[in-house]
Structures are given as C-alpha cells and as structure tokens.
Image: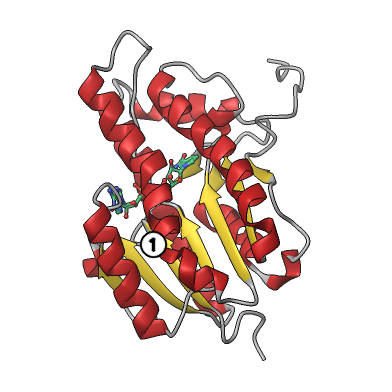
Amino acid sequence: MSELSGLKALVTGGASGIGRATAALLAARGADVAVLDLDPSAVGEPLRGYLADVSDDASVRSAVAAAAEALGGVDILVNNAGIGAVGTVGDNDDAEWHRVLDVNVLGMVRTTRAALPRLRASAHAAVVNTCSIAATAGLPQRALYSASKGAVLSLTLAMATDHVREGIRVNCVNPGTADTPWIGRLLDRAADPAEERKALDARQPMGRLVTAEEVAAAIVYLASPAAASVTGTALAVDGGMQGLRPRPRAR
Ligand SMILES: NC(=O)c1ccc[n+]([C@@H]2O[C@H](COP(=O)([O-])OP(=O)(O)OC[C@H]3O[C@@H](n4cnc5c(N)ncnc54)[C@H](O)[C@@H]3O)[C@@H](O)[C@H]2O)c1
C-alpha cells in the first residue's frame, strides 16, 4: 500500500510551482488530492481542480466544502497560495499591504477555518503552511512580503498549540529562493535577468536555487503520518541560506 493511501488532501495554490509539485507528490504517494487555485484550468487527473480565491471567504468555504465532499473528508491541508511584494517599508501603499496580508495570511486562516471540522474528524490530520526564508532573514526590498511570512511563522506556532490536543499537527516549510514561475516573473522584470539569476543563485550557500520538488518533499513529509510527532516546526529548505555562513568563494 502507498504511504498516503486513503488520505485526502487539499492544496491551495496547487496549479503552479511549489503547490503543483506538492499536489503531484501527494498523489504519487497515494493521497486523493484537490487543488484550490485562482486558475485551476491546467489541473488534470488524478488531481481535482477547484476554483478558489483565498482572499474571499465565501469562495474558500464553497471550494473547501465541494472538495471535501468529493474526496470524502480532509486529512491534509497545505496552505500554499501566496503572492509577492517588492519594496521597502516606504514603497507599498496601504492598499498593497492589505492585499498581500489578505492573501498570504488571512488566506491561510480562511482555508484552515473552513477545513477544521473535517480535520478534527481525521485520525491523521496535518496542516502545512508554506512560509519563507523571508520570515527568518532580512532580505532587501521585501518589507511587506517578509511581514506576511513572519505572520505565517507565528500563526503556525499558535495553530499548532491550539489544535495539538485535537490531534491536528501544524507545521510550516521555509523555502529559500525556489525555481518556480514566480521567480521567472521576477527575473523577467529585472534590468538584466541573467545577472539577477546569478545573484540569486550566489546568495544561497549551495550556489543554486531550491527546486519546487525539494520543497514539495518537505511538505509531504510534514503532512504524512511519518511525521506523527512533529508539530510547531519550521523546516527550512533553503540550500543553507538561513543557517550557514560560508566564507565567500576565492576568486
Ligand atoms: N518561489 C520562491 O522563491 C518562494 C520562496 C519562499 C516561499 N515561497 C512561497 O511558496 C508559495 C508558492 O509560491 P510559488 O513560487 O510556487 O508561486 P507560483 O506563483 O508559481 O504559484 C502560486 C499559485 O498560487 C495561486 N494563487 C495566487 N493567489 C491566489 C489566491 N488569492 N487564491 C488562490 N490561489 C492563488 C496562483 O494562481 C498560483 O497557482 C507562496 O506562498 C510563496 O510565498 C516561494
């Protein structure tokens, strides 16, 4: 029997990048998987796609209800949908702050709130939030994005505490810069995309970006019964970016 067979999983933002790799790996390990995304049009078998905007409570509630009904429950919730923001604290206006916090933080609140009754009914309930290296390291030009991911880190700990006695584990992963369509869009906007890519690679001690599949492997571990004693943790998948201080390479 596959490791996750019989388990039902929801992945927000599962139509692209890290979410897409996570949904595919959950399914490959035997889970029944529903993807909730702003654009689920490219989601194909064996995944089920549902249109959902995590910044809209009614949309989240109806997508979670429909997905849970079709799957026959929810054991695993991966809160992964997120958006970026570039700038110092002086650069983003109030509307942008509200928009990004609404998607990145409240989005996780809405999906978890909607899925909680189903999670409580599961014998293997796990929530995994996609956080970021931006929660634990000061990155340039990421004031708003970092604030949103710092909130995700604290929210993960608080949720893990609130639900530990209900048998629901809550953890997060902290990816370093990951090679997804998101970073592709950032590079496209750079003055010199090749130079920018080199700078991003060099910022990671391993000298390369993290892959979506590497982040997915960590999410799936935290979501699986193999991690039954793991809750309230942040698992870095960042090529050493948070913890290591290697000397610069000799030129
Ligand atoms: N790529 C990176 O370098 C990196 C690093 C650290 C953390 N992360 C985090 O990983 C997560 C996924 O990022 P990615 O790089 O795979 O991005 P991506 O842009 O490739 O995929 C994001 C997905 O989320 C969906 N989405 C966006 N807003 C949504 C909304 N309001 N409702 C529902 N779905 C929505 C998009 O349609 C898309 O399918 C994000 O939370 C991001 O903050 C990414």
Relative to 125, residue 158 above or below:
above
Task: Give the x, y percent position of residue 58.
Answer: 23, 58
Cβ(mark 1) to ligand 1 < 8 Å? no
* Residue 228 sits above or below residue 91 on the image: below
Q: Residue furthest bottom?
A: 1
In the figure, is residue 125 to the left or right of 227? Answer: left
| Residue on which disc 1 sits | 114
Q: Residue at x 66, y 39 (%)?
A: 239
Q: Please state the total of marks drawn on the protein image.
A: 1
- What colouring style does the render use? secondary structure
Residue at 56% in and 55% down: 128
Q: Position of residue 53 (x, y in %)?
A: 25, 54
- Which quadrant is home to the C terminus? top right
The answer to which image quadrant residue 190 occupies is top left
Task: List x then y, in percent, for residue 119.
Answer: 53, 69
Q: Position of residue 139 (x, y in %)?
A: 51, 20
Dividing the image into 4 quarters, which one contains the N terminus?
bottom right
- Residue 233 seen from this side: yes
- Assign a secondary structure to mark 1: helix
